[in-house]
Amino acid sequence: MHSKKIIVVGSCNTDMVIKADRLPVPGETILGGTFFMNPGGKGANQAVAAARMGGNVTLISKTGNDVFGKQSVMLYNSENIKTDYVFSDPKQPSGVAMITVDSNGENCIVVASGANSYLSPADIQKARKEIESSDLVLMQLEIPIETVEYVAELANKKGIRVILNPAPARALSENLLKNLYIIIPNKTEAEILSGIKVTDVESARKAAAIISAKGVNIVVITLGSQGAVIKDGDDYHFIEAYKVNTVDTTAAGDTFCGSVCVGLSEDKSILESVQLAAKAAALTVTRMGAQGSIPYRAELASFD
């Protein structure tokens, strides 16, 4: 069975990570951390997750004409991701994220978006045929919002299912929400979209109801170690998280989103797709780093 085509439109960054015992307070220097560099960015992470889960993936993104950008494209190619529409910006540097992770796996992140901020509707025009021949489009919010809105409208008009992971958190226009098939916010993002403080399953259900009333068919709110709540039409489902030893939560949400898309591309229901995603995300948090921690489909057998 050949799975349907997934297009990921989003950011790619290089993550520079320092793991320390604790996060520094302002003005403080902490010695004794370990450093490593990792390809990252929500768009690229989600594309890699979808590819490792067996999806047929094309990435639309923008890098700088620098060593980080070139390295990223080589990596995506090695993951069997189609990179014909990873554009190179001659004027802007590639995106970079500085990440500090403490001994509990909590992190704090600063991102310099670079070329990601310049992925424009004009670039999307160049990839239009590719988008129109796809079955699913997955996006996040580390690229300009007008580009996200443009893609959502373009794809939705053609009957292509648009999935948005509204991260980093921000308010969204009603027009964008109406063009979505599925939205996958975490607790913070769901709170911004609904006005309801999301702390547990009950408050997540209330938030999902408000968000779906704005025109999104399916709402999936991820609650980290508490699991995920799905609102699909009038039906609610709760998927428990798998109990694992958490080392680093970086890219868990991205793995979840990419995996949901692969499930849907294989004609699984939203419930089955989220169950697949919960397994993949659980494995991700047991490892350090962003793309390095994303599992392959075969590894999910450990949960069966």
Image: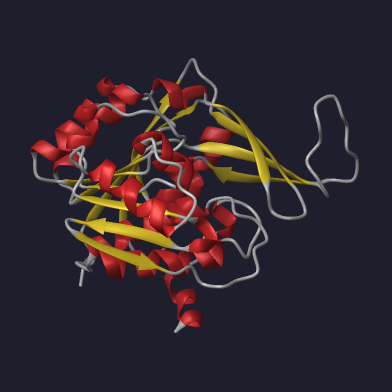
Across and down, in percent, residue 239 comes to: 39, 68
Q: Residue at image x 31%, y 61%?
A: 262
Q: Which of these two is toward me, 163 or 61?
A: 163
The answer to whether residue 297 is visible is: yes
Can residue 79 be seen from the camera position used here? no
As drawn, the residue found furthest toward the top would be 91
Number of numbered labels in the structure image:
0
Left or right of residue 121: residue 140: right
On the rendered image, what quadrant is the C terminus found in? Answer: bottom left
The residue positioned farthest toward the left in the image shown? 158
Residue 8, how many percent across, how many down?
33, 44
Compared with 224, 304 (above or below) is below
Residue lying farthest to the right in this orientation: 31
Please tell me in which quadrant of the rendered image residue 211 appears: top left
**Residue shown at 55% from the left, 40% from the top:** 71
Residue 190, placed above or below residue 126: below
Percent x, y for residue 283?
A: 54, 67
84 horizontally vs 154: left or right? right
